[in-house]
Image: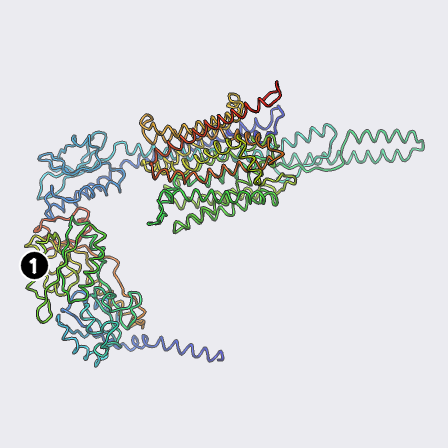
Amino acid sequence: MKMATRIGVALLSGLFWLSPPAMAQGAQEPFEIFAVLWRGETKVEDGFRDYLNRRGISYNLTVRNLDLDRDKAPAVVEEIKRVRPDLVYTWGTATTSSIIGKLETDTPGAHVRDVPGVFVMVSYPLQSGIVATLENPGRAATGVSFLPSVSAQLKTIETYGKFKNIAVIYEPNASNSRVNVEELQRDIREFDMNLIELPVPLLENGRPDPAQIPVLIQSAKDKGADLLYMGPDSFLVSHANAYTSEAIAAGLPTFASSQDPLKNSRAMFGLVTDYYTLGKLAALQAERILVERQHPQDLPVAQLARYKLWINIDVVREVGIYPPMKMISIADFKTSPGS
Amino acid sequence: MSRLPSPSMVSGTTKTGQPGPRGILGKLVCFALALLLVGQAVLGWLFLKDFEEELKPQLNQKAIAVGQSLAGQVGYAIDGIGIPVDRLVGMDEFFDDILVLNQDIEYLALVRSPDNRLLYVRGLPDSLVENMRSNLPEEGAEPGREREFEGYIDLAFPVAAAGEAGVVLHVGVGANYVHNRLLEILFEVLTVIVVTGLLILEFLLFFFAMHISEPARHFQSALKEGAQGNFSNRFTIQVMDEFGAVFSRFNLLMRDLARRYEDFSFEAQEIKNAQIDEKLALKVQGVHDRMEKKFNAGKILNLRARTAAQIRVPLLLFFFAEELSRSFLPLLAARHAPNDPGIPVEMLMGLPITLFMVAAMVCTPFGRGLADRIGPRRVFLVGAGLTVPGFIGVFFTQTYYDFVVWRMLSGAGFGLMLIASQTWVEDHVQERHRATGMSTVAGSVFAGLFCGPPLGAIIAGRIGFEATFLVGAAVAAVSGLIVFYMLDDHVEKRRPTRALPDLQGWLTLLTDARFVAASFLAAFPSRLLLTGVLFFLAPLYLDELGNRPSTIGWIIMLYGLAGLAILPVSARIADWFPAPGQRVALGAAISGTGCVLTFLEPVFGGATATMTLTILFLGIGHGIMFSPALAVTQVIGEKHRDTVGQSSVITAFRMVEQLGLIVGPVVSAVLVICLGFSKTIVVIGGIVLVCTVLYGLISYNARCHAARTRQPGSLS
């Protein structure tokens, strides 16, 4: 190949790579983003929008809510295939596995596989089979991880007080809950603690039975639990008010690994991610895909470096288990919602 | 401070008995040092005075800030969260964290004043806890109210909590804190003054020898020879200083005299040739011949100053660089030790010292051969070329294995530099003065051990352990530069080979009770003590006893100080104990006793005080036995001159010594794992004492045997 031809080819390739963002920015054509949520909007979406707005990125955000029902997913998948957005945003493990599907799936046609995706609030993207590795997702989707490690959570529990028997109530059908329990089983060996596992019994339709929550809490109490661990379990989070009230009534404090039970219910303390900041981190991933034209496959699943220690003062007073002085100087104290 | 053996003493060459340059040197050194020390002391005093004036109010401010912050946090816990004051959780850990972060605060206490109940207290001795009583400040009084309490300044901070009345936080600042800190700084300043004073003294001696005393000695000898008619001496003038100018005039004078002599000789030849009378010609020839016998202007000699003592300063600097890390080396090794290594951490702490010595030992014969081929100066430079990167490497080290490799590189350089220095000394002193010459090496070792540990600890306290190695690298580089610029290359032609004995030679030596006793029962244990106790156990034990790094440095420094003090008085000790073997036994016994003293820790006022005494004993013992040990080997070497060879005997002796250096940390680490620090030191001391007794018995027996086989009436 002659030198002039080589230079020509190089310039053309350069233009090819440069052109999409330049066209996008130059033409001011808004990006089409399709958001699918599990239980309505949260602070994550606020952070997501605010970041894109502050960066001056023009976009249209279409929001669909599965409302805790996987059966609604196929219709949304069809809609996405029809609309062909620039990016699909999915909230939670159940939504993500319903909309974009797992990495290995027998029914690829039932999912959106060819549109870049960003997922949020997926507790265990690797263990749930959403990505191949956290460094290299292996597919046209990446996201943000939001859970601090189970080991860090147990360390927080240990620092707070002398809790020996930790009870975990969980939805056995949800893969992220199962993975969470497996992580607990593994990491608790490093601590002087015991794990009491209490799966929520299922109804005939295969859904967990909310009426069993008080029974399970009492059962935990009877088995000698001195702390309830509430994992990133959407079923329990959606019934967090009932859960935490029953726990307080039984004199048991609740540790939460996600923000909702602390913010909207009466979990006593937890090591959590700030949802708003998490949304901003997801928007940064979206910017890399939409504006910088990076392929999601090359984008590692992002993680926040810092977590917040939240303590609900009202619950502390009610239960009468006080945090140590060392924690008081670093924790964010909240009151119960509505108090 | 004891006086060091001066270069001229070491070289043993200025023996004129006339008022010479030594007098000038003494006055010059005294004057310069006095001025320097007074200047530094005044500067230090002024600095400390200002420091005290500024430190006190600032510490007060800080204690108030800490007290207010803590009272605020406790208030929030009581009021904000609603925790009853007597149910606050984790107060001990909370207070402990604050006390660790604020060394000036001695205790923290929370008191409920209505019932004067001491709820939480940390840092206050148990005996004073009962006396702790709160006096609530009167209404409206400022927080931070001061009062004296049992040698503390007690600051009271009322906790503003609506839920609990009369809760007061007490912050205790040691009344002597500033005084103690100042005392520590004063010690540090003094250390720097003493160490710099010693280094300056060494440098002055070095430059004096190079530029004044040695040229003056040569000048005297040239004048003496000139007075006897030898006009052949010329000086190679390197520097046009005052002596350079004198030498230049002297060279002109000599050249003029030589030219006149040549003229006279030529004229005499011409007169002789012009004589017809043969008798007269023979007479003239006779006069000419007699003149030639009286005066000599035939060949020109270049006189250059080169003495054994010239290696002293570079060697001292090199030891100084190495010893900078002495007070914390095992601690640094522990810091780099892998989490789950599979071998005890004590071994990992000792291993770098052992492998350093192994590298040095491996390089020693190589360096000796190299010195015979390319001269000691170049070997010294090669050693510096290995040591400096070794030091720098430690600064960048990431893992334990890196650390060990860099230390081994430094060890290889150490071996080369040491053998180069020994070779240099051997080349510049006569055989009979070798022991005296070697005291140059001993002087440098002890001076390095005197200067390095305390200064290294002070530096490490400010810039960190690793960065201190960079300072070491700079000092070692200066040492190399001095050798590069100031010493000459030379290769001694007829140096005897100094290989290890062959198998037959070893058999001969190992069946000689005196050799076995001198090497395995005296030299080996003493080297084992050096690396095992001084290099390995002392820093770790003193650290475990809670001493600050600078204190550890000062205590280890005493070894060098004791050694330096003993070296000049070794001649007097020789008067009391004429046989070198007796002095070796005396030194070994003193060092062993020092270790056994650890057994009596309560008698000597605690473990740190006893360890200090032990190290002092080690220094004295090793100082006493250094030169006589060499003399003993020379005597044994003389005995085996025809079978093994004297130099091979010395080489074999050195090898056994080095084995002691290598196994010291390993033996100590194993014993520490089983017995703990104090018992290990006692056991090692006991072993040394047993070895000393055996050595004494064998030496005595051997001497009696030798006396019996000697001719009656001969002197021993």
Q: Position of residue A74 (x, y in %)?
A: 17, 77
| Colour scheme | rainbow
Examine the rendered structure and indicate whether residue A168 appears above or below residue A89.
above
Residue found at x 63% / y 31%: B217
Examine the rendered structure and indicate whether residue B627 appears above or below residue B711.
below
Q: Quadrant of residue A64?
A: bottom left
In the picture as drawn, the residue positioned furthest to the right comes out as: B276
Check disc 1 and report its element: helix, strand or loop. loop
The answer to whether one can see residue B604 in this image is yes
Q: Position of residue A94 (x, y in %)?
A: 18, 69
Q: Position of residue A300 (x, y in %)?
A: 30, 66
Q: Please name the amino acid that badge 1 sits on.
A: Gly
In the picture as drawn, the residue positioned furthest to the bottom comes out as: A82
The answer to whether one can see residue A30 in this image is no
Q: Nearer the viewer, residue A133 or B288?
A: A133
Q: Which residue is mark 1?
A: A338
